[in-house]
Image: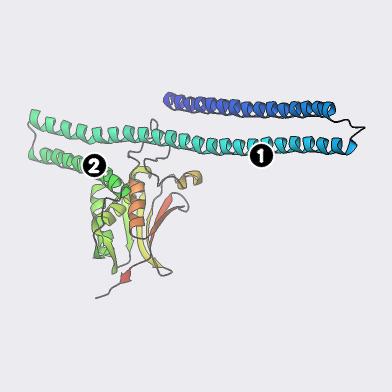
Amino acid sequence: MKRFFNKMQEGKSVSFVYFLVMAYTIAALVWWGILLFRQSEQIKGFEQQNLYLRVDSLAQPVEHQLELQRINKEEHMRSFKYLGEGIIFLGIILLGAVFVYRAVWKYMKLSRQQQNFMMAVTHELKSPIAVAKLNLETIRKHKLDEETQLKLLNNTIRETNRLDQLCNNILLAAQLETHNYRLFKEPLDFSSLVFGSIKDLDGRIGTHQINAEVMPDIWLEGDKLTLQIIVNNLVENAAKYAPKNTTILVKLFESNKELKLQVIDEGPGIPDEEKGRIFLKFYRVGNENTRKAKGSGLGLFLTAKIVEQHGGSIEVKDNVPVGSCFEITLPEYSIQTA
C-alpha cells in the first residue's frame, strides 16, 4: 500500500512539474506578445511624430492624411501578424504538450504494469519451484511408502507443468505481439477439443465443479494448440477468482449463425470500469501487493490475441445473479454430422 501511495505521489509530482513548466512557457509567450504590441505602439508613435515634422497637416492635409492612414494600417498589420503568430505558436505548444503528456503517462502506466507483471511472475515462478524442491527433498530425506512418494511426485509434476505453462505463455505472448508466431490452421473438431480440455481441467482443478454444455460436431479451421490455450486460460481464470466449491460452466453453442463459446463462473464479477482493460497486456484487477489470486496478467491478453488471430471477438459480461461470463464469438465454422 505504501509503495502504491508512493507511485501516486510520484505521478502527481511529475504532473505538477510538467504543468508548472507549461504555465511558465505560456506566461513567457504572453509576455513576449505584450512586449511586441508595446513595441508596435512605440513604432507607431515614432512614425507619427516623424510625420508631423515632415508634413504640415495644415499646408498639406491630403498628404498628411494619407501618411497617417498608412501608419495606422501598418500598425494594424503588425498587430494582426503578432496575434496570428502567437495563436499558432500557442496552438503548437498546447498540441505538443498534450501529445507529450499522454506519451509520458502511457509510459508510466506501462512501467507500472511491467512492475506488477514482474512481481506476479516472480511469485508464480517461485511457488512451483519451492513446492517441487520441498517434495523432492522430502522424498530424499525420509523413507516414505510408495503411495506417499507417488503423491508427492504427482504434485511435483503438476507444479512443473504449471511452471512450463507460464513460460509458454510468456513466450507465446511475445511471439503474438511481434507477429512471429504463425498459426497452424487445420480442420479440427472443436467440440471434441473443448470437451477434452474440460475433462483434463476437471482432473487438475479439484476446487471447483466444471460443467459442460457442448454442442457436438462443430468443426472449424484453427490452430489446435492455441485454441486449447483459450479454453484452459478462461477456465483457469474462472477458478482463480470464483470461490471454492462453486460451479464453472463451459458452453459451446450456435446463435444467430455464429459460434459462441462461454465460460461462466460464480465469482465476484468484474466492475464495469475494468471490463475494457482486462484484455490488456500485464493488466490485472486490483493491486499486486494485496491481490490473493495468482496470475501474471498474460492469460486474458493471450486469449484475446488468439481469438483475434482466428477472426473472432471476445467480451466479458455479467452473469446473473453473480459472477462473470466470458463470451467468444467465432464467425467461421461448420456442423459435420456422421
What residue sits right under mark 1 in the picture? 84
Point out residue 136 in the picture as x, y percentages from the top left corner.
Answer: 12, 33
Q: Nearer the viewer, mark 2 or mark 1?
A: 1
Label count reads: 2
Above or below, 204 relative to 56: below
| Residue 325 can be seen, yes or no | yes
* Figure coloring: rainbow
Residue displayed at 51% across by 35% down: 101
Point out residue 92 in the picture as x, y percentages from the top left corner.
Answer: 57, 38
Query: Residue 99 versus residue 61: which sits nearer the camera?
Result: 61
Query: Residue 196 versus residue 106: which sits nearer the camera?
Result: 106
Point out residue 90 in the picture as x, y percentages from the top left corner.
Answer: 61, 35
Q: Which quarter of the figure has residue 60? A: top right
Screen quadrant of the C terminus = bottom left
Q: Decide which of tag 2 and tag 1 comes sooner along the chain.
A: 1
Above or below, 210 relative to 21: below
Residue displayed at 36% across by 56% down: 308
Asked whether the beta carbons under mark 2 and mark 1 sit within 8 Å of each other, the answer is no
Residue displayed at 85% across by 35% down: 64
Q: Is residue 196 left or right of residue 285?
A: left
Q: Is residue 236 left or right of residue 133?
A: right
Residue displayed at 25% across by 44% down: 171
What residue sits right under mark 2 in the picture? 167
Residue, far bottom: 338
Above or below, 255 relative to 38: below
Q: Looking at numbered disc 1 in the image, what kind of residue is underneath it?
A: Gly
Q: Looking at numbered disc 2 in the image, what kind of residue is underneath it?
A: Cys
Query: Residue 121 versus residue 294: which sits nearer the camera?
Result: 121
Q: Is residue 278 left or right of residue 12?
A: left
Element class at badge 1:
helix
Q: Compute the Cα span from label 2 to label 1.
A: 58 Å
